Structures are given as C-alpha cells and as structure tokens.
Amino acid sequence: MRIGPFTPKDHVVITTLGLEFALAVAAGTAGGYWADRHWHWTPWGTVAGVVLGFAFGMYILIRQAGEMARADQAKKEEKTDGSI
C-alpha cells in the first residue's frame, strides 16, 4: 500500500532518521545531566548536552539528506543515459 508520494522504503528511512535525531538529543541530555551531577555544573551541563545532541542530530540529518540526494541524482542520470 502506497501512502502519498513515498514508498515503504522511504517511510523506513524517515522513521530511522527521526529516531536517530531523538536519540542524539536524548544522549546529549543524559550526558549533560550526568556532568551536572558529577561536577555540580547545574544547569550548564544539561544545556550544553542538549545543544551538542541537537547539533549532532542535525549533522546526521544533513549527512543523510546529502546521501539521498546523490542517490536520487544517480538514479535520474541512469534513466537519462538512453539505456533500458
């Protein structure tokens, strides 16, 4: 069953990206919270952890978007080269 313009594989990729982003932010937050408790940096460890987790999550999304764009471009070039 096709939902919108996306294939089932696209849905898996989108879900995976969302989970990777959420896990990056959660791991950064947990690390920052640990730093707060361990070195008494409250609240700056958690704030730094959230920011770093968000930045890493964005890095993951941007890297994957680039890979998807390159794959899409290669697929388009493959279709336009005249071969069957």
Image (cartoon, rainbow, N blue to C red):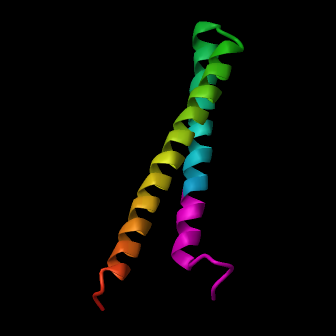
Spot occupied by residue 60 in the image (x, y as percentages of width and height):
49, 45
Q: Residue furthest top?
A: 40
**8 magenta-colored:** yes
Q: Which stretch did the figure color magenta? A: 1-16
Which image quarter holds the N terminus? bottom right
Q: Position of residue 67 (x, y in %)?
A: 41, 56
Is 18 included in the stretch rendered in magenta?
Answer: no
| 28, 62: nearer the viewer | 62
Q: How many marks?
A: 0
Residue at point 52% right, 36% down?
56
Q: Residue furthest bottom?
A: 84
> Relative to the observer, which residue lies in front, 51 or 64?
64
Give the residue displayed 67% in from the left and 81% down from the top: 3
> Residue at the right extreme?
43
The quadrant the C terminus occupies is: bottom left
Instruction: Relative to 48, say whether 76 is above or below.
Output: below
Query: Where 61 falls versus 30 (above or below)?
Result: below
Q: List x then y, in percent, for residue 33.
A: 64, 23
Residue lying at 66% horizontally and 22% vertically, measured from the top left: 46
Residue at 58%, 44% (x, y): give it.
23
Q: Quadrant of residue 73?
A: bottom left
- Residue 30 lies, in percent from the top left, at 61, 30
- 78 left or right of 35 in image: left
Relative vertical location of residue 76 with respect to residue 28 in this rendering, above or below: below
